[in-house]
Image: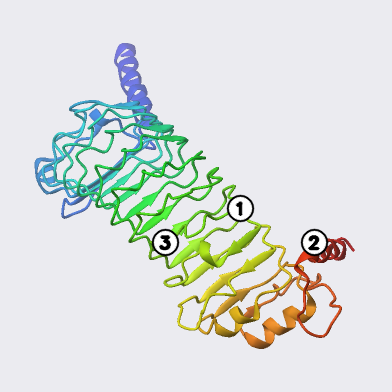
Amino acid sequence: MILKCSAVYLIALILIIQLEKHTAAWCRTTNDHKNHTCDGFRFREIVLSRSTKLDLLRTRIYNCKETEIKEGALVSLPKLENLTISCKSIQNVHEKAFVNYGNLQELDLGHNQLSTLPNKVFQPLGNLKTLNLTGNSFGDLPQMIFDGLGGLRELLLSHNKITNFHVKVFDAIRGVQKLSLDHNLINFLPNRLLTKLRKLQYLDLSNNQIENFSEFFVLAFQLRYLNLSHNAIEGLPLRAFQTTRLEVLDLSNNKLTVVYEDALQFKTLQELYLQNNQISIFDVSGMNMEYMPLQLLNIENNRLVFLESDFMNTASNLRELNTFMNPWDCACLEEIEKIHHKVIVRPEDYDGPLCVSSTSNDCSVDRNNLTVYYNAFVKQLEL
């Protein structure tokens, strides 16, 4: 009797331990067998029925406690179009890990610990449209890492540690339209890097350490959205964006001091973000803005004392102008407000100075004395 009780107790204890081990682990499959999600299981513990294997279109694997994706680690899923493996722990991927996934259109390997990948690891994925490698530990991108991805349209490399590129690393993905490289450690952009990306429309390089970019965008003919915010850019090369079709340009949170008309592409630009720089001169006096599409201009928190009246008078499409926290000459700021009724002067909860007192009733500013306005404005803020 005692032996029977002991055996029952032991079995119960084993069941409890196993239950606790998998308490947080779960898998779910939709009734149509097309979507499957697992959290907390290792690859070998994930069991799929035959009908699910044949019909599955999307599978997502989270927190799998694996350190690598070996050859054959994933079961063959002939119709699979979307695969997510986000385990926070994957460090290596076998070169043949995806040989049975030729139908994939989206692959998400984000939020792991990948720092390198075998050359041509993605070569079997000729139908892939989106590749997400966000939140890993990539430092360098070797030349052949994206070989075989001729149909790729979207590449996400945000939140890595990228510092270096092979100049031909993107040559194999000529059809890419969206490229995200934000939140890395990039300080140098090779001029040839985008040469083959003639269809690129969206490029995010924000939150890096870029200081200059010379002729980097010369061949980016289709580029419409560009984010260079939160870098260390001190000056804009002349005609830097002339060959693009930029509609949105974000240069906020840099170290710009002067912006000239030849540096920007106003023929297509609709939104321009220049806030949080050190700009004292915004010289676009020679530009006829009347037929240009600029609708939003953010110049908050700079060192601007005035804007050219020609610019304000001809920027007929401008709908929003953010001027807060600049050492404006008061007469110049008043002139801007009269010309443009959509000026956002300050937030509702701000009680500080809006401008620096003028010496005349009209906007007449000596460009050689702009620092005087800035110093006076700083003193007003300190009061």
From the viewer's perspective, is residue 57 above or below residue 125?
below
Left or right of 56 on screen, residue 19: right
Mark 3–mark 2 distance (CA, rounded to whole Å): 34 Å
The amino acid sitting under disc 2 is Thr
Lower sequence index among marks 3 and 2: 3
Label 2 sits on residue: 371
Q: Count neighbours of disc 2 (C-alpha within 10 A) and say few if under 14, some if 14 to 19, many if 20 or more.
A: some
Out of 40 and 229, give the one closest to the viewer. Answer: 229
Badge nearest the viewer, 2 or 1: 2
From the viewer's perspective, is residue 108 above or below residue 275?
above
The amino acid sitting under disc 1 is Asn
Mark 2–mark 1 distance (CA, rounded to whole Å): 19 Å
Label 1 sits on residue: 254
Label 3 sits on residue: 225
The amino acid sitting under disc 3 is Tyr
Residue 276 visible in the displayed image: no
